[in-house]
Structures are given as C-alpha cells and as structure tokens.
C-alpha cells in the first residue's frame, strides 16, 4: 500500500493562513522579538576594550559568545541547505580559540557574518517546506532547525547582554 505525501507530511494539512502565521512566528523568534533578545541590541556599543574580558566565575568572554553564536548559526544554516556539509567537531569547533578578538576588525566581521547568515536562514524559513525531513539528517526538519536557532541564540544573547551590562559598571 502506497502512502501519499499528504498523509506523512503535515505541511500539506496546513492552510495558507496557518502556514504564514507559523513562518512569521519563527522569523519573529529568530529576530529576537517577544520574549527573546535582539542580536543587534546585544552587540551594539559593546565596549571594544571589554570584548575579551571575563567576569569572575563567568565561563566566556563577549568575543567567545559572539563567535559561538556565529559558528553555531552558520552550522545550522549550512546543514539546512547543503546535504554535503560537514559540521565542525564538537565542542572545540564551535568556540573560538582565543578569549580576545584576534584583531581590531574581527568583532565587526563576526557581527556582519552572523547577520548575513540570519538573513539567509530566515529566507529559507520563508519559502521552504518546514516539515520535510532532511534526507541527510536523522529526522531533522527546517522547523526544528529554526526553533533551535531561536532558542540557542536567545540563551547566549542573554549571556552576552548580562556580560555587557556587568562590564559597563
């Protein structure tokens, strides 16, 4: 007995208004709206001289958090659109090697790369099937990856914002 796509994929059971609402909610969460922190607000005006500073007992510097956010989001984007992509080794491949930015322009380059990848991921969410399982994955879908980005970014942006406020004092 053949099973039709409609019976195994929720995508076809959603009407256009439900699908548009889901896509909007996902993009809003990835943008940092509602209960999430916005990326631009967290990185804006972060003092250059404090980007490699740690608070007592804190596990990461602002530079480490920014780079981790960029690397992880890039990994999720590439996994979502490129079946031949290979993720970095965990955990060392997801964190920068140094506590400080390597040069005066590294912070801005990382911010721009994060923003570019965020735009590209939101473009995927806006048009691709959210429920189709990736053939190269282990059951992952674009919906799952978008939620992962929103949650992961929210967590680490909260850390970054806390660090920004604490180091300003």
Image: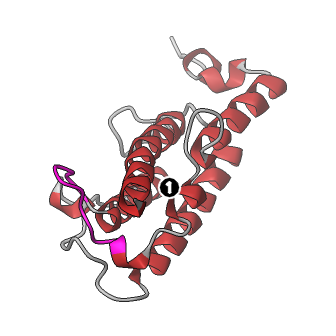
In the rendered structure, the answer to whether residue 37 lies left or right of residue 51 reads right
Q: Is residue 52 magenta?
A: yes
Which percent across, then down, holds residue 148?
A: 44, 39
Q: Residue 118 appears in which quarter of the rendering?
A: bottom right
- Magenta-highlighted residues: 50-60
User: Based on the displayed image, in which of its 4 quarters is residue 75 positioned?
Assistant: bottom left
Residue under the image location 24 percent in, 56 percent down: 55
Q: Is residue 91 left or right of residue 30?
A: left
User: Does residue 74 sit above or below 146 in this rendering?
Assistant: below
Q: For residue 50, which quarter of the picture?
A: bottom left
In percent of the image, x 70 and y 46: which residue is there? 126
Question: Is residue 136 something that shows in the picture?
Answer: yes
Task: Report which residue position mark 1 lands on.
Answer: 81
Q: Position of residue 47 (x, y in %)?
A: 44, 73
Q: Residue furthest right?
A: 17
Seen from the viewer's position, the closer of residues 147 and 157 is 157
């Amino acid at each position: 007995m053949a099973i039709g796509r409609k019976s195994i994929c929720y995508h076809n059971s959603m009407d256009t208004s439900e699908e548009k609402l889901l896509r909007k909610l996902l993009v809003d969460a990835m943008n940092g709206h509602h209960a999430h922190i916005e990326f631009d607000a967290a990185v804006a005006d972060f003092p250059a001289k404090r980007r490699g500073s740690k608070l007592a007992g804190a596990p990461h510097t602002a530079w480490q958090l920014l780079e981790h956010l960029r690397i992880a989001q890039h990994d999720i984007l590439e996994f979502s659109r490129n079946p031949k992509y290979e993720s970095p080794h965990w955990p060392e491949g997801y964190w920068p090697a140094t506590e400080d930015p390597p040069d005066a322009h590294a912070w801005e380059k990382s911010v721009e790369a994060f923003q570019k990848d965020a735009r590209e991921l939101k473009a995927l969410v806006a048009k691709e099937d959210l429920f189709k399982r990736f053939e190269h994955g282990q059951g992952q879908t674009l919906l799952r990856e978008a939620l992962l980005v929103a949650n992961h970014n929210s967590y680490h942006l909260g850390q970054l914002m806390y660090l920004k406020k604490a180091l300003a004092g």
